[in-house]
């Protein structure tokens, strides 16, 4: 047995209003006047002075506003990298992602591809990255994915939806300012928050579980219950706690794996473009068989917040389209192994997945 030597985020700031300290955090990392800081910022903040006025710009620093309507693609990473290389004579001093999982993943991928040749699609997989990335910083503005702490950046490529998993992927610096999440729309808050909850359930019930993962997973689970069920927290407390739940949930799966909801949601995402958070919710809602307790509590949470999930996604799909989703899903071997054990192929048949997808 060989144990993973897992890189952790080396520096973290936590606190309401800490976003105002960004300049102080970045300043020592400027390589020279010609090496800019490039900010990849969710375009939901365009024209939002409360956020943008605190992004420190000097010399050739630049803000690139990016839509989070679609999840990141390898081609999008390649275009951004080319744009940066063509525009500046020097490599950037740093890449700073300000947004949700979509923007954080883009920032990680761009920082890797600025120092590694070829296309982002060549690095989808495990430990394919050769050179250290450019200094990169993550500033989450919505909580749940754990992308701020994870060792992967999930990208959709021409052939697969798969992360660039490497020791160079994690951020060098993370700034956690829960106040940045105050205007997240309620539905989205629930979907992305449930990503964290589902990470906990999948990690805590998985066959890969160990004391490391369990300690983080239990904490995240406890926080999720407080936030989504107990209904005793102020908005501020809830924002603070969800940001830490996301972190702990991410740490929990770092040393274990996710499970059935993620494996099946990847299929929906690949074929239909269903986004990660809502996709996980749509799938998890039908997984009583695998996670009886977890699904029961999920339904209580949905009810408590009046959340109606989209229905009938797979209603008009062809056999070929079902097959594509099933292929993508079955390709997530470690997820299935974690969820149901080494003999998972005997339990998770194509027919079973088809029947489940047909319910969604
Ligand atoms: P997101 O980044 O896609 O954002 C969802 C929506 O919320 C967008 O419309 C965005 O504009 C909006 N939004 C974000 N912050 C806001 C704010 N403060 N105020 C108002 N609106 C705001 O959502 P997400 O769920 O955080 O991320 C999903 C992505 O994360 C997927 O691409 C998924 O693959 C990825 N992911 C990555 C990891 C990882 O470990 N790298 C883990 C899980 C998910
Ligand atoms: Zn997830």
Image (cartoon, rainbow, N blue to C red):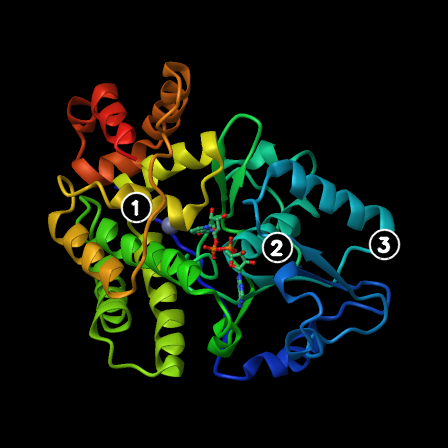
- Residue marked by disc 3: 88
User: Does residue 42 appear anywhere in the picture?
Assistant: no
Give the residue drawn at x 35%, y 27%.
315
Q: Residue 276 carries which label?
A: none
Q: Are marks 2 and 3 in contact (CB under 8 Å)?
A: no
SS at mark 2 in the image: helix
User: Does residue 360 appear anywhere in the picture?
Assistant: yes
Q: Is 125 placed above or below 67 here? A: above
Viewer-closest of 348 and 37:
348
Q: Where is residue 311 in the image (x, y as percent from the top left)?
A: 33, 40
Image quadrant where one finds the C terminus: top left
Q: Quadrant of residue 61?
A: bottom right
10 left or right of 308 in image: right
- Residue marked by disc 2: 107
Q: How crowded is mark 1: few (under 14 residues within 10 Å), some or many (20 or more)?
A: many
Q: Do the residues labelled 1 and 3 touch (CB within 8 Å)?
A: no
Give the residue drawn at x 70%, y 48%.
114
- Residue marked by disc 1: 258
Mark 1–mark 2 distance (CA, rounded to whole Å) = 23 Å
Give the residue drawn at x 64%, y 66%.
45
Q: Where is residue 343 in the image (x, y as percent from the top left)?
A: 16, 27
Image quadrant where one finds the N terminus: top left
Q: Earlier in the sequence, mark 1 or mark 2?
A: 2
Q: Earlier in the sequence, mark 1 or mark 3?
A: 3
Mark 1–mark 3 distance (CA, rounded to whole Å) = 40 Å
Give the residue drawn at x 40%, y 37%.
266
Q: Earlier in the sequence, mark 2 or mark 3?
A: 3
């Amino acid at each position: 047995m060989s144990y993973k030597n897992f890189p952790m985020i080396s520096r973290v700031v936590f606190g309401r209003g800490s976003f105002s300290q960004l300049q102080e955090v970045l300043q020592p990392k400027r390589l020279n006047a010609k090496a800019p800081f490039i900010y990849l910022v969710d375009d939901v903040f365009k024209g939002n002075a409360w956020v943008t006025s605190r992004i420190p710009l000097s010399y050739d620093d630049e803000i690139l506003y990016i839509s989070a309507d679609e999840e990141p693609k390898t081609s999008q990473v390649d275009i951004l990298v080319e744009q940066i290389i063509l525009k500046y004579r020097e490599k950037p001093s740093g890449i700073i992602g300000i947004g949700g999982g979509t923007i954080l993943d883009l920032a990680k991928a761009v920082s890797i591809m600025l120092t590694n040749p070829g296309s982002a699609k060549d690095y989808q997989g495990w430990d394919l990255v050769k050179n250290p990335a450019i200094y990169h910083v993550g500033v989450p503005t919505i909580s749940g994915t754990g992308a701020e702490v994870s060792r992967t950046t999930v990208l959709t490529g021409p052939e697969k939806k798969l992360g660039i998993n490497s020791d160079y992927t994690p951020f060098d610096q993370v700034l956690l300012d829960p106040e940045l999440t105050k205007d997240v729309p309620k539905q989205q808050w629930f979907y992305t928050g449930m990503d964290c909850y589902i990470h906990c359930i999948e990690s805590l019930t998985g066959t890969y579980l160990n004391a490391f993962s369990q300690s983080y997973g239990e904490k995240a689970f406890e926080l999720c219950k407080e936030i989504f069920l107990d209904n005793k927290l102020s908005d501020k407390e809830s924002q603070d706690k969800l940001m830490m739940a996301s972190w702990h949930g991410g740490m929990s799966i770092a040393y274990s794996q996710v499970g059935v909801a993620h494996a099946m949601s990847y299929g929906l995402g690949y074929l239909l473009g269903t986004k990660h958070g809502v996709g996980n919710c749509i799938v998890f809602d039908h997984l009583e068989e695998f996670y009886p307790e977890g699904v029961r509590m999920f339904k209580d949470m949905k009810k408590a917040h009046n959340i109606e999930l989209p229905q009938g996604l797979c209603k008009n799909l062809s056999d070929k389209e079902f097959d594509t989703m099933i292929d993508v899903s079955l390709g997530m071997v470690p997820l299935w192994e974690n969820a149901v054990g080494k003999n998972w192929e005997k339990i998770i048949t194509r027919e079973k997945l088809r029947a489940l997808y047909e319910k969604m």
